[in-house]
Amino acid sequence: KDFSQIFAKVNQGKGTIGKLINDEQLYKSTVNITQSADKSLSAITTRLNEISDIIVNTTGSIKSIMTNVDSAVIDVRTLAYRIERGEGVLGSLIVDKKLADSIRTMIKNVAKISNDARIATSSFAENMEALKHNWLFKNYFEQRGYWSKAEYEKEIETKMEELKKQNENLDRKIKQLLELEKRLEKAREE
């Protein structure tokens, strides 16, 4: 009798089980969710397969890299051993103290010469600038065009501004002349 009452309520759509069994829309939603979950699981499985393929390929590449690193380490050890024995240019430099001292001296001299050349160039530039402004040599430098680029650019810019102003003034004068000419023609016609 109890089972019969429960089944009657289920058939009437009462309770959770009754709603699940009798509601068509809820049934379709459940089916859609299940299908969507199945598609999502398939996509996840495909992605995981792709990732595992990448990991397998990367593992092969890592093995190759490790082999190359091992080979490079062996080559470096061999090179270091030869240098310690005094073989080659580096080995000669390390073993032969006189040669190493002579190279150090050469490097110091090159650095000193480079520094001296920088100082000399700077001094020469200062001296040339002073000569440009000296009244005895100023005319020479003006004729040769040895003035700084910034000064020339500034001078050109100033002259361009002057030309622009003169051009505007000339345009105004032309307009005035045209207006006077029109007035003169009207006066002749009257």
Image (cartoon, grey):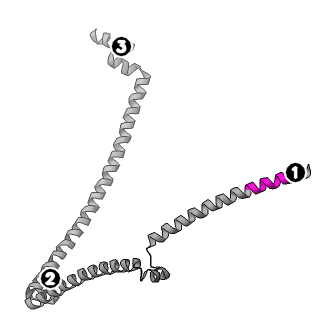
Q: Give the image location of residue 116, x and y in percent.
A: 24, 82
* Circle 1 residues within 10 Å: few <14, some 14–19, many ≥20: few
The answer to whether residue 38 is left or right of residue 67 is right
The answer to whether residue 150 is left or right of residue 122 is right
Instruction: Please state which amino acid type lies under the numbered disc 2.
Output: Leu
Q: Give the image location of residue 97, x and y in percent.
A: 8, 88
Instruction: Please state which amino acid type lies under the numbered disc 1.
Output: Ala
Residue pointed to by mark 2: 79
* Circle 3 residues within 10 Å: few <14, some 14–19, many ≥20: some
Contact flag, marks 2 and 1 (Cβ < 8 Å): no
Q: Earlier in the sequence, mark 1 or mark 3?
A: 3
Q: Earlier in the sequence, mark 3 or mark 2?
A: 3
Question: Which of these two is toward me, 74 or 80?
Answer: 80
Tell me the quarter of the image containing the N terminus: top left
Measured in 3D between alpha carbons, the distance from the residue under mark 1 to the one under mark 3, in whole angstroms, is: 110 Å
Query: Looking at the rendered structure, which numbered label has been put on residue 14?
Result: 3
Front label number (1 vs 3):
1
Q: Residue at x 81, y 56 (%)?
A: 181
Measured in 3D between alpha carbons, the distance from the residue under mark 2 to the one under mark 1, in whole angstroms, is: 106 Å
Residue range in magenta is 175-185
Quarter of the image where one finds residue 20: top left
Measured in 3D between alpha carbons, the distance from the residue under mark 3 to the one under mark 2, in whole angstroms, is: 87 Å
Q: Residue at x 90, y 53 (%)?
A: 188
Residue pointed to by mark 1: 187
Question: In this orientation, does residue 96 appear?
Answer: no
Does residue 55 lie above or below 154 as drawn?
A: above
Q: Residue furthest right?
A: 190
